[in-house]
Image (cartoon, rainbow, N blue to C red):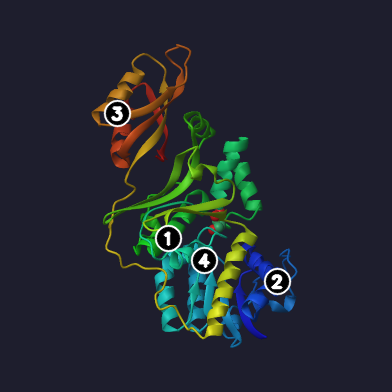
């Protein structure tokens, strides 16, 4: 049986899941592909550290060049994370004529186009299925079985860490810091979880999906993005009272030649399918003009689910090697569409104010909304006990409005003397 040799950069959470998946299912993979896949070298800068996995020590190398210069290695798997060094390593591997598999959404978002061009020039393949939604095969689905469709909308829960935190806060009243630590211990979070909780990781994934589905280059930095760090338990409880669950959602909508996109915590109606996606599970909902509405659901983070996706890409590359296919004629990421980018578009919004419960307060707030043409769908005010001095939460859900027009009204509302502060503003899914 032919052996295809693989070099792996990194021995973190996803790398271990990849190694374990290939070992655990070795016989099944060999039967299915007719080749033996052998990870022969692993870049591990600290071979003395206990990595919690049984790997023969002789596989470890401390210099990446030992992998790039090994003529027997045909596939390089990049799993070190981060942008600059990872990109440099992938570029070096491609330039050395090696196929590359990665799970690195940040590097693919930032440098995917350059890396694809390099892969083409060097007649090798670049695969990154694991970069979006972990174990869910969304990128392959878009490229092959769904390729015949035009999609009007993408809706995604694309980050396991934040979905886990919000689920724990919603279902068990867990404190944010405790839920985050738990997500880190379970191997869902990035090494630095800032990118998770600030929505940047989800923005990177949405940017990749947008370029694959709409052929439009929209860097994460241009996508309006809000994370979950200022979601208070009060927001979660009020949302429940209104019949919603708060989810960090990525959304993109194509309306004619206009594209809208955002990543933000969103009140999702509790009977909407996205409201039931919990913990580290991710989901991608697509509305296609041939297939209709479709949802892919599965584990979006964690060692084994993400390792499964990386291993799948390795197998796909191995099959191409066997067939003698050199490279992708049409690389999956595209940046050629002429679309007008229209920001986050209009939406319903939830607004939580802190205001002093005294006569006239609601009337003044209502008249500012009215002057700006903002309709109120629902409101709740907690009692201040008729003391005329107690600050209480006042919650509104307002009808469809542009975020910047809403902000103008909220700036005015904040000047009202009974209003102490605007505590939170969250999008509401229709
Ligand atoms: N930190 C990421 C998440 C890992 O929580 O979804 C998968 O990309």
Picture quadrant where residue 65 is located? bottom right
**Badge 4 is on which residue?**
129
Do residues under tags 1 and 3 come within 8 Å of each other at their CB atoms?
no
**Quick check: 304 above or below 194?**
below
**Badge 1 is on which residue?**
209
Assign ligand 1 to one image quadrant: bottom right
* Nearer to us: label 1 or label 3: 1
Mark linked to residue 369: 3
The residue tagged with tag 3: helix, strand or loop?
A: helix
Residue at coordinates 35% horizontally, 65% vertically from top-left?
Answer: 215
Q: Say few, some or many: other residues with alpha carbon within 10 Å of mark 2 (under 14 / 14 to 19 / 20 or more).
A: some
**Badge 2 is on which residue?**
23
The residue tagged with tag 2: helix, strand or loop?
A: helix
> Which circle's residue, 2 or 4, is located before the other in the chain?
2
Estimate the x, y position of residue 321 in percent, counting from the top left: 54, 83
Do residues under tags 2 and 4 come within 8 Å of each other at their CB atoms?
no
Mark linked to residue 274: none
Q: Nearer the viewer, residue 213 or 168?
A: 213
Residue 264 makes an appearance in the image: yes
> Which circle's residue, 2 or 1, is located before the other in the chain?
2
Q: Nearer the viewer, residue 331 or 226?
A: 331
Quadrant, the C terminus: top left
């Amino acid at each position: 049986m032919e052996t295809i040799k693989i070099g792996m950069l990194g021995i973190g959470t996803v790398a271990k899941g990849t190694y374990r998946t290939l070992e655990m299912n070795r016989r099944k993979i060999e039967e299915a592909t007719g080749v033996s896949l052998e990870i022969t070298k692993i870049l591990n800068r600290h071979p003395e550290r206990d990595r919690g996995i049984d790997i023969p020590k002789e596989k470890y190398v401390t210099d990446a060049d030992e992998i790039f210069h090994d003529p027997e290695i045909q596939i390089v798997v990049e799993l070190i994370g981060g942008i600059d060094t990872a990109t440099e390593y992938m570029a070096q591997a491609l330039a050395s004529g090696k196929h590359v598999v990665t799970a690195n959404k940040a590097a693919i978002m930032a440098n995917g186009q350059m890396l694809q061009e390099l892969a083409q020039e060097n007649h090798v393949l670049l695969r990154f299925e694991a970069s979006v939604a972990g174990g869910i095969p969304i990128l392959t689905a878009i490229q092959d079985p769904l390729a015949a469709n035009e999609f009007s909308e993408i809706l995604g829960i694309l980050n396991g860490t934040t979905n886990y935190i919000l689920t724990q806060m919603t279902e068990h009243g867990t404190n944010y810091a405790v839920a985050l630590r738990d997500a880190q211990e379970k191997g869902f979070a990035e090494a630095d979880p800032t990118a998770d909780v600030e929505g940047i990781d989800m923005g990177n994934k949405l940017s990749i999906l947008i370029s694959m589905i709409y052929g439009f280059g929209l860097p994460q930095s241009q996508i309006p993005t809000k994370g979950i760090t200022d979601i208070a338990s009060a927001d979660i409880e009020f949302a429940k009272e209104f019949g919603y669950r708060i989810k960090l959602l990525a959304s993109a909508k194509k309306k004619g030649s206009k594209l809208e996109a955002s990543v933000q915590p969103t009140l999702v109606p509790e009977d909407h399918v996205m409201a039931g996606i919990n913990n580290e599970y991710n989901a991608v909902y697509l509305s296609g003009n041939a297939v209709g509405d479709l949802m892919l659901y599965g584990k979006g983070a964690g060692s084994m689910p993400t390792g499964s996706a990386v291993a799948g890409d390795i197998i796909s590359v191995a099959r191409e090697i066997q067939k003698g296919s050199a490279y992708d004629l049409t690389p999956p990421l595209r940046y050629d569409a002429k679309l007008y980018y229209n920001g986050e578009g209009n939406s319903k919004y939830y607004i939580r104010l802190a205001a002093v419960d005294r006569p006239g307060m609601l009337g003044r707030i209502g008249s500012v909304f009215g002057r700006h043409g903002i309709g109120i769908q629902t409101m709740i005010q907690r009692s201040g006990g008729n003391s005329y001095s107690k600050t209480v939460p006042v919650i509104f859900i307002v009808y469809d409005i542009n975020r910047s027009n809403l902000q103008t009204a909220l700036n005015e509302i904040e000047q009202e003397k009974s209003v102490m502060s605007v505590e939170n503003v969250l999008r509401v899914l229709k």
